[in-house]
Amino acid sequence: MEHQLFGKFARLSAQPTGGENSTGLGLSIVKKLVTQMAGEVGCESEHGNGAMFYIDLPFKV
């Protein structure tokens, strides 16, 4: 499922929650940028309770 979620042009919901238009590119772009910065991006969700997305970037001094 995660592969589909972060894939290009992925639309996993039939209706966006705010009625907005979607190209399905947003999460794909985020995943690419975070990966290029040696980070991780992911999602935790529970059916009927929404989803929480997280980004973990390395801290370098």
Image (cartoon, rainbow, N blue to C red):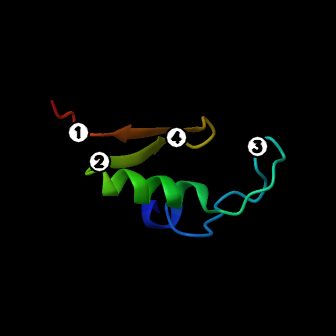
Query: Which comes before the other along the chain, label 3 or label 4?
Result: 3
Residue of label 1: 58
Q: Amino acid at mark 4?
A: Glu
Q: Would residue 25 be found to the left or right of residue 1 on screen?
A: right
- Disc ID at residue 39: 2
For the residue pair 57 and 1, the one nearer the viewer reads as 57
Q: Position of residue 61 (x, y in %)?
A: 15, 30
Residue of label 3: 17
Query: Which comes before the other along the chain, label 4 or label 2?
Result: 2
Q: Residue furthest front?
A: 61
Q: Amino acid at mark 1?
A: Pro
For the residue pair 49 and 33, the one nearer the viewer reads as 33
Compared to residue 18, the image places residue 37 above or below, namely below
Mark 2, Cα crowd under 10 Å, few <14 / some 14-19 / many 20+, is: some
Compared to residue 33, the image places residue 48 above or below, namely above
Query: Which comes before the other along the chain, label 3 or label 2?
Result: 3
Mark 3, Cα crowd under 10 Å, few <14 / some 14-19 / many 20+, is: few
Asked whether disc 3 touches disc 4, contact meaning CB atoms under 8 Å apart, the reply is no
Real-space CA distance between mark 4 and mark 2, rounded to the nearest whole angstrom:
24 Å
Real-space CA distance between mark 1 and mark 4, rounded to the nearest whole angstrom:
27 Å
Q: Would residue 1 be found to the left or right of residue 50 on screen?
A: left
Q: Residue at x 76, y 43 (%)?
A: 17
Q: Position of residue 45 (x, y in %)?
A: 50, 42
